[in-house]
Amino acid sequence: MRFDIVTLFPGYFASPLGESLVGRAVERGILDVHLVDLRDFSDDPHRKVDDEPYGGGPGMVLTAPPVFAAVEALRSEVGAPPHVVFLSPQGRRFDTRCARELAARPRVALVCGRYEGIDERTRAAGLFDEEISLGDFVLSGGEAAALAILEAVSRYLPGVVQDAVSVSADSFEDGLLDHPHYSRPRSFRGLDVPEVLFCGHHEEIRRWRREEQLRATLERRPDLLGAAPLDDEERALLERLARERRSP
Ligand code: SAH
């Protein structure tokens, strides 16, 4: 899959693109990441891409011409046209579903804003296919959001995460949070690993993990439970856990 990242700070991505799962995916050609320096599209001799806001006020605005030029250059390249995403706190909230949708596309361009924001005419002209937000907070630029999205999306590309089962068991995949994980040592500071994990009985362990998923979701993210696809047995189990919580 190809990503084009349009940014004022291409250097920001150097280390993350060389490390860990994403680094290996890039090395193995599963991920092809192109960094596009927005300043290359400025027609200013000083490569300026920002200017003062009309109407006054603090800060600077990312001007329209270089952003149009950069996106149009990407769209005019031969091959699959990119799905162009502007990263913005005003966009649709990024989540697992959004990550899967992006992973199904051959090419995605992530445009990183800076300063007070971007000239509104980029939106008015429909320059972007969509706007995505990392959450209800404001970053100083889209770069951290681009990295988070790149990493979350790449987990769905075949071959990036070695064990595909580990992705399908992650939090949110089946509408619930993940179950707890334990490893050596068996006893640590007086805390023991649950006995069931040593019983060697796969079905029993599976059932225990499912119950722990329900328990974690009930305790930490009860808002997810309404939409989680649960069978009758799991609904009954959830009822029991909820009752236990009310009167332990
Ligand atoms: N004044 C703007 C925010 C500008 S922050 C507003 O309130 O809407 C500068 C840039 O950082 C934005 O253009 C965007 O590209 C990026 N950014 C900030 N918060 C973000 C978020 N939650 N998700 C994705 N990108 C974000």
Image (cartoon, grey):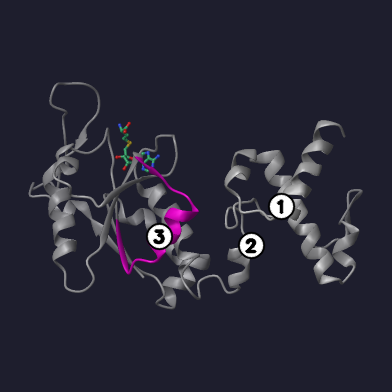
Give whichever of discs 2 and 3 has the lower sequence position. Answer: 3
Mark 1 to mark 2 CA distance (whole Å): 10 Å
Q: Is mark 3 within 8 Å of ligand 1?
A: no
Does residue 56 appear to the left or right of 222 in the view shown? Answer: left
| Relative depth, front residue between 88 and 129 | 129
Callout 3 secondary element: helix
Who's the residue at 46% across and 55% down the image? 97
Does residue 214 appear to the left or right of 26 in the view shown? Answer: right
Q: Which residues are magenta?
A: 91-109
The residue tagged 1 is 213
Who's the residue at 38% across and 60% down the image? 102
Where residue 220 sits: x, y (%)?
67, 40
Where residue 139 sits: x, y (%)?
39, 38
Q: Quadrant of ligand 1?
A: top left
Q: Amino acid at mark 2?
A: Ala
Query: Label 3 crowding class (10 Å Cα cut-off): few <14, some 14-19, many 20+?
Result: few
Mark 2 to mark 3 CA distance (whole Å): 18 Å
Callout 2 secondary element: loop
Q: Amino acid at mark 1?
A: Gln
Numbered label attached to residue 169: 2
Which quadrant: the N terminus? bottom left
In the image, farthest residue toward the top? 56
Looking at the rendering, which quadrant does residue 114 occupy? top left
Give whichever of discs 3 and 1 has the lower sequence position. Answer: 3
| Relative depth, front residue between 171 and 193 | 171
| Relative depth, front residue between 120 and 220 | 220
Does residue 106 appear to the left or right of 176 in the view shown? Answer: left
Instruction: Tell whether position 149 is magenta.
Output: no
